[in-house]
Structure formats: structure tokens, C-alpha cells
Amino acid sequence: MKYTQLGNTGLEVSKICLGTMTFGEQNTEKEAHEQLNYAIEKGVNFIDTAELYSVPGRKETQGSTERYIGTWLRNRTDREKLILATKIAGPNPGLSYIRNPLNFSREQINIAIDGSLKRLQTDYIDIYQLHWPERKVNSFGKLGYEYDENEVWEDNFAEVIYSLNELVEQGKIKFWGVSNETPFGVMNFIRRAEQHQLPKPLTIQNPYNLLNRTFEIGLAEIAIRENVGLLAYSPMAFGLLSGKYHDGSDVSQSRINRFPQLPRYSSEVVFDVAGRYVEIAKNMG
């Protein structure tokens, strides 16, 4: 396993992070524990989850992923050697069952972190992330920003930074980061943090793969110049880049087949482009 230092955190993390959003939906608790054990045995020390998970988000399964990790973590003695990351959900009218109101106010951030700590059965989170912005933005590879003049959003970057810093001072989190963010959001967090002499976001978790390279447009320069570590998710594009959907080795339980309501990688154009990448890979051995 290869390791790298994550941003300015000083954390040495494995190049491969175990994403766990399938725990509680596609994977049972027993299977989740088996995956966690296998990952650790292979040198992975980095685990990522969220209060929303498992995916797709449902009231019946919300928090199940953190709970499964918690029952696994409870029996271990090496917590200090593991880098554990989780996320607080942002506004979404279909997810009001998680918390209400679903926002990044100081009150809701405290409710969310306490819920995650309880489910994970740990005293602290290494990296606490804002799962997506409070304001309306393009996420998941969508292009062409459309401004909504009726959008109700109040600039509260400073309140969020102060609230997260309180969690750092309380020992509940070590570092914080963003996810599904834009250049506007990342630079505002950095600028406000510097103005108030508070810790800035040290990580950004956005999609990045051969079918979704939006990170390169504006965020790559910010990540490099401001030393904000990228936690790239969906590197295999829901498994499409593995080639299994093209050679017929996929099954009914494969993610794209099982969850047609998640259309990010299921269009004809995307399928065609992925097929061309698969051919290049085959030709190159």
C-alpha cells in the first residue's frame, strides 16, 4: 500500500480509501465487517462514510453505514491508527427525516456530529465534511450553472467555520473539509477562515474519473495552490469503467442495474465513451 500526506493535516493516509456507502443497502453488517477487515489487512487506514448513508438515501437505512462501522470499531484497539471521515448532510427537501431543519447552523452541526459519534462508537472524527453546499450549485458532474433569483440562501460561511472550530476545540473532530463544492465555495471558506484566523478546509471530496473531469476546470488549481487535499470519489464511475457492463459480466445487483434512479453514469453517451476507454485498456494490456 502507498501512503500520502493529506493536505496540511499531517495525516498519512493510504492512497486507497474505503468508501462505505453500500453498507446497509447492498451489504449486510457481516459483509461490511468483512470488507473493513480485508481493507485493513491490505494496508488501508482511511475509511469514509456519512450520516446520510447508505445510498440511495432512505429513512429506513439512514445512519446504517455509520452503525455498521461502529459495531466493527467497538471491538478494535487501533482506533488511533485509523483515519475516519464522515459528513454532515446539507439541505435537501427529500431528506428531512435526517434532521429538521437540514442546514449548517451551529445547532444542527452539533446535533449532527453527536449523532455520528454515537453511531460510530468513537470519541472523535478525523475529518468532518460538509456533504454538499447549502446554496444551489452544480453537483455530480453537472455543467452549465443556472442562477435561481428566488433561491433562499444566506451567506453563513463564517458561522460554519466558527461552529466547526468549536468542534475542533472540543476534541470532537481533528480537521474539516468540504464535498461536492465549487471554486466559489472553497475560496470563500478559505478567505473567511484567514480573515478570522481560524482553520481552513483541508480536504475536498468531489467526483473525479475518466468520465467526470470537472475538478480540473477550476478546483485543481485551488487544491494545489491552497493545499486542499482531493478525496476523489467514484473513481470507477459506479463500476462502469471496470468494463463489466460492456462484456456482460454485470449482474442484476450491480449498482447501475440496481439503482436506475441514480442516472449519473447510465446515459448512452456515457456508456459509449466508457466503452472506448475499455477498448484502449484492453489494447494496452
Image (cartoon, helix red, strand yellow):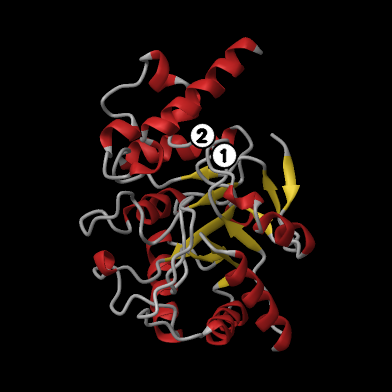
User: In the rendered structure, which disc, 2 or 1, sits on the residue that comes first in sequence?
Assistant: 1
Q: Secondary structure at mark 2?
A: loop
Place of residue 103 in the rendered image (x, y in percent of width and height, measured from the top left): 39, 77
Name the image quarter holding the N terminus.
Answer: top right
Q: Position of residue 182 (x, y in %)?
A: 57, 64
Horizontal and vertical percent for residue 3?
73, 42
Which amino acid lies under the numbered mark 1 shown in the image of this protein?
Asn
Asked if the residue at tag 1 contacts the one at tag 2, i.e. Cβ–Cβ closer than 8 Å, the answer is yes
Label disc, if present, on residue 179 of the rendered structure: none
> Can you say whether 49 is above or below 199 in the image?
above
Q: Nearer the viewer, mark 2 or mark 1?
A: 1
Gap in angstroms between the C-alphas marked 2 and 1:
7 Å
Identify which amino acid the numbered label 2 is placed on. Answer: Met
Q: Residue at x 39, y 74 (%)?
A: 148
Q: Quadrant of the C terminus?
A: top right
Tell me, yes or no, if residue 134 can be seen here. Answer: yes
Identify the residue under disc 1: 209
Residue that appears at 48% across and 57% down: 144
Residue 217 vertical placement versus 252 (above, below): below
x 58%, y 50%: residue: 214
Q: Few, some or many C-alpha atoms within 10 Å of disc 2 (few <14, some 14-19, many ≥20)?
A: some
In terms of image quadrants, where is residue 210? top right
- Quarter of the image for residue 62 reads bottom left
Residue depicted at 79% across the width and 62% down the height: 225
* 251 to the left or right of 114: left
The residue pinned by badge 2 equals: 236
Instruction: Decide which of 136, 225 is in the foreground and name it.
Output: 136
For label 1, the SS is loop
